[in-house]
Image (cartoon, rainbow, N blue to C red):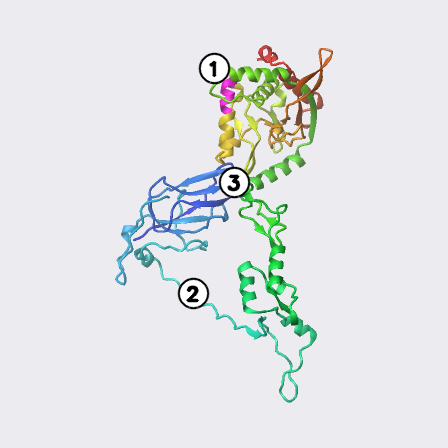
Amino acid sequence: MPTYQQFPLPDAGEGLTEAEIVAWHVAVGDTVEVNQTIVEIETAKSLVDLPSPWAGVVTQLLVQPGQTVDVGTPIIEVDTDPTGAAPVEEAPPSPVAAPKGGAIEHGHRGGGNRHAGVEPGGSDEIEAARPARAPEKEPEPAREAVLVGYGLAETSTTRRDRTPDGTPAAATPSQREATRHALAKPPVRKLARELGVDLDSVSPTGPGGIVTREDVLGRAAQAEARTLATYPGDDAPWLASGTVSSDGRQTRVPVKSVRKRTAEAMVTSAFTAPHVTVFHTVDVTKTMKLVERLRADREFSDVRVTPLLIAAKALMLAVRRHPDVNASWDDASQEIVYKHYINLGIAASTPRGLVVPNIKDAHRLGLKELATALAELTATARSGRTTPADMSDGTITITNVGVFGIDTGTPILNPGEAAILAFGAIREQPWVHKGKIKIRHVTQLALSVDHRLVDGALGSQVLADVARVLHDPSHGLVWG
């Protein structure tokens, strides 16, 4: 006998409660193997491929791509014993499609509510083995519209009054307004359908109140998307699932996945941790010269060296000198948790939104290893493959606003951390150097801290140490 297993959406990590089905890698009737990838989902943190825990034949896809479902919701059904189905006399079984993909956690076909999804299109043998279902009620035939002039009258639930002799009484103004429909000739109606224009929304200019071709074209032009209101899909892929208003002036996009999680985290951080931000403007000419020397060094020929690399190293040196900044506030237990390691977070802007993966045990890495880790972290984030584990247990973060040409800002803390450094754009500016005004490379730094954990003195000391290393990287040799 067939054995149906329903696979509930699992928690992909970090206590997530929901996920969006991005794409199925299998279809109804496909044969799947154990650990074969069956579906790609998008959680609030990353894209995840789910493998099949069984071998068998896919009988139902219970959730369509684009739908967001809660953890525990069945998303696919697999027959793990398709060869045990009873033969069907009415029609021979259809051939099973070639293998494609597979499911994850174990579930059982039960008598509970079924989730809407793709109906099976597999073999007749599988379908015949299912319990008989009650025939669905046929939909009622549509009510016929009434022709009025060139248009169609709206369906009405009331009837006109009649005079004593049985003839219809004259319609009142409100009745005429309720049943009024735009008048238009068939070619104009066809044009309106092709352009997606609702004739009832068009102001007629033709004789006798008839909608003309020019009226329809004018209404369609008003509804066209405007450059300042909508955006090309390639430049803004997150708008692909949005709905454009009829006049083209707005696009509404559901808040989900990374953007939803980011919004929740930022609101929690902003209204839980009291933020204090300190600023510092620093001459980083020597850092820029070091970057140029490292780029020419054969030891660093296979890695990308940037000022951010030196800033990351400077921050970790500052944390080593002031370890109290590397902490978190445990509100549940009312304890301060001091971390004896540095998981360095790097805020990354991606098409899916802002993510903050971190380099595990970054304090153990040399400068070249740190450069390699930064490159790998950035590439993974931009491809949308950052995992929940990559974003968990961060201890301190850098946000590089300088890549956008921004001088500085007041960054919001990554939840669970006590400090975040904003690294601004590096510009050539007039600067007093050794008593003379010279053109130097200058940047601005901003450090936001959780004032419950870090007071103004400690925050200032940390930022001053970061600035000192960026001003003269040789300090790192002394402190390191």
Nearer to us in this view, 464 or 34: 464
Nearer to us in this view, 338 or 317: 317
Q: Are marks 3 and 1 in contact (CB under 8 Å)?
A: no
> Which labelled disc corresponds to residue 136?
2
- Label 2 secondary element: loop
Mark sitting earlier along the chain (1/2): 2
**Residue that mark 1 sits on:** 298
**In the image, residue 298 above or below residue 263:** above
- Give x and y (percent) for residue 169: 66, 82
- Give x and y (percent) for residue 110: 40, 53
Front tag of 1 and 2: 1
Q: How many C-alpha atoms fall within 10 Å of the one at disc 1: few (<14), some, or many (≥20)?
A: few
Q: Does the stretch in magenta take in 267?
A: no
Residue 265, by quadrant, is: top right
Nearer to us in this view, 194 or 123: 194
Mark sitting earlier along the chain (3/1): 3
Give me the residue at 37% from left, 55% from top.
120
Give me the residue at 62% from left, 32% from top.
331
- Secondary structure mainly formed by the magenta segment: helix
The Cα atoms of the two marked residues, 3 and 1, are separated by 45 Å
Mark sitting earlier along the chain (3/2): 3
- Label 1 secondary element: helix
Q: Is residue 249 visible?
A: yes
Q: How many C-alpha atoms fall within 10 Å of the one at disc 2: few (<14), some, or many (≥20)?
A: few
Residue 259, by quadrant, is: top right
> Which labelled disc corresponds to residue 16?
3
| Magenta residues (range) | 364-373
Amino acid type for the residue under numbered disc 2 = Glu
